[in-house]
Image (spheres, rainbow, N blue to C red):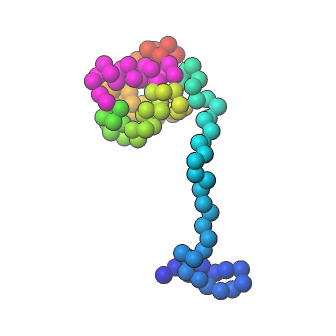
């Protein structure tokens, strides 16, 4: 059993130590870039290419080794994805990154 020292020198089991509680019911604020036109265009291009290939978001996420909710957020323009994640998505879709960027008019 893991013991935790207190400020007065007593050692007590870890499960008696008061843990901070998360505030429930409060939505996390959206990042300032969420909904940016560049991200929504990129998300639309990824969604369009995915639909052409007949893949679901879940299938794309599995092939790209990403979380399904993350892929959904990318398609909605909520996530500022990295170049490496764009590369994973492009590889999973069987296209070049430049094709996705060109379709997004970037």
Q: Position of residue 39 (x, y in %)?
A: 53, 24
Which of the pair 11/26 is nearer the observer? 26
Q: Position of residue 47 (x, y in %)?
A: 39, 23
28 to 15, vertically: above or below? above
Q: How many marks?
A: 0
**Residue in the picture at 52% in, 16% down:** 106
**Residue in the picture at 31% in, 25% down:** 94
Query: Does residue 98 appear anywhere in the picture?
Result: no
Q: Residue furthest right?
A: 8
Indicate whether residue 72 is drawn in magenta. no
Which of the pair 11/27 is nearer the observer? 27
**Residue in the picture at 33% in, 39% down:** 62
Bounds of the magenta span? Answer: 40-56
Query: On the image, which quarter does residue 16 sit in?
Result: bottom right
Q: Residue furthest bottom?
A: 10
48 to 73, vertically: above or below? above
Q: Position of residue 29 (x, y in %)?
A: 62, 39
Q: Residue furthest left?
A: 54
Indicate whether residue 48 is drawn in magenta. yes
Magenta residues: mostly which secondary structure? helix
Which of the pair 85/21 is nearer the observer? 21
Query: Does residue 37 appear anywhere in the picture?
Result: yes
């Amino acid at each position: 059993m893991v013991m935790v020292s207190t400020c007065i020198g007593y050692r007590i089991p870890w499960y008696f130590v008061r843990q901070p509680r998360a505030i429930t019911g409060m939505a996390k604020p959206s990042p300032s870039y969420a909904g940016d036109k560049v991200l929504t265009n990129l998300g639309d291009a990824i969604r369009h290419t995915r639909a052409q290939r007949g893949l679901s978001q879940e299938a794309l996420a599995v092939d790209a080794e990403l979380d399904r909710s993350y892929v959904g957020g990318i398609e909605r323009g909520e996530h500022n994805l990295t170049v490496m994640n764009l590369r994973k998505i492009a590889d999973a879709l069987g296209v070049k990154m430049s094709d996705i960027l060109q379709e997004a008019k970037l």
